[in-house]
Image (cartoon, rainbow, N blue to C red):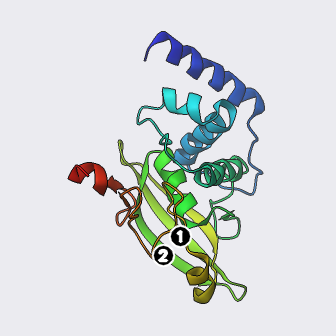
Amino acid sequence: MNEDSEAYAKRLRAAYEDEAPAPSAAIEVPDVFWYVHFKAFAFLSAGPDEYRSHDALRQPPENLPAARLHAIQRGCERILQFQGLSPDRPIEGIGVDGFYALLRMFHFALDQQVALEIGAIGTILDQMKMRHVVDGRELTLYNLVSVKPLSDQKADGSPCPYCGELLRTAFAKQCRHCGADWHDPANVVNRKASSGV
């Protein structure tokens, strides 16, 4: 860690101790969640560019569309309020793609996703079991996702989560415009870059 990074970490740690919200007594907080809580605070305090410049894995990527960065910001705001730790207090309003971007920024990969409940008003509660990509720590979070009817998804023309161009279908996992392939959300690749096109 260079001197600049040490000063950055010290400044954020002091601000975190002074400003970060504390959980209510009713919320059980696993140890690994404090790591995520601090990283959410750091992202919101520093902003994406400064955060990335001090992040060991250079997250979040520079080429994320504004909508994806906004989802990460909303997710961090909810993490700071201790949402996501239980099915009765899930993270809301960031969707599935936003949740994947959030967990990548925290250096986690998805181990298992289970749809626990399908709500009558077009929502699905996902249980997301994750593992830290470096040290293997595990964390389970809950994400409430709004689901559009299939007919609306096709009419919308879903945007690519990496460049924002319209995908061929609402279910596409690869973009013909930028070459991003997210069939494996933990290992997104760029097909155009790898093929030399």
Tell me residue 104's x, y (percent).
46, 50
- Which residue occupies the foreground of this view, 82 or 176? 176
Say if residue 140 shows up in the picture.
no
- Which residue occupies the foreground of this view, 134 or 180? 180
Disc 2 + disc 1, Cβ < 8 Å: yes
Neighbours of disc 2 within 10 Å: few (<14), some (14-19), many (20+): few
Kind of residue indicated by mark 1: Gln
Which residue is painted at 64% across and 81% down in the image? 148
Kind of residue indicated by mark 2: Val
Residue 33 to residue 146: above or below: above
Tell me residue 6's x, y (percent).
52, 16
Q: In the current view of this chain or complex, which residue is farthest to the front?
A: 197
Which residue is painted at 59% across and 36% down in the image? 48
Tell me residue 159's x, y (percent).
54, 65
Q: Is residue 79 left or right of residue 190?
A: right
Which residue is painted at 47% across and 42% down in the image? 61
Which residue is painted at 50% across and 45% down in the image? 105
- Which residue occupies the foreground of this view, 68 or 128? 68
Q: Which numbered disc covers residue 114?
A: 2
Q: Which numbered disc covers residue 127?
A: 1
Secondary structure of the residue carrying tag 2 is: strand
Residue 148 to residue 194: above or below: below
Secondary structure of the residue carrying tag 1 is: strand
Sequence-wise first label, 2 or 1 = 2
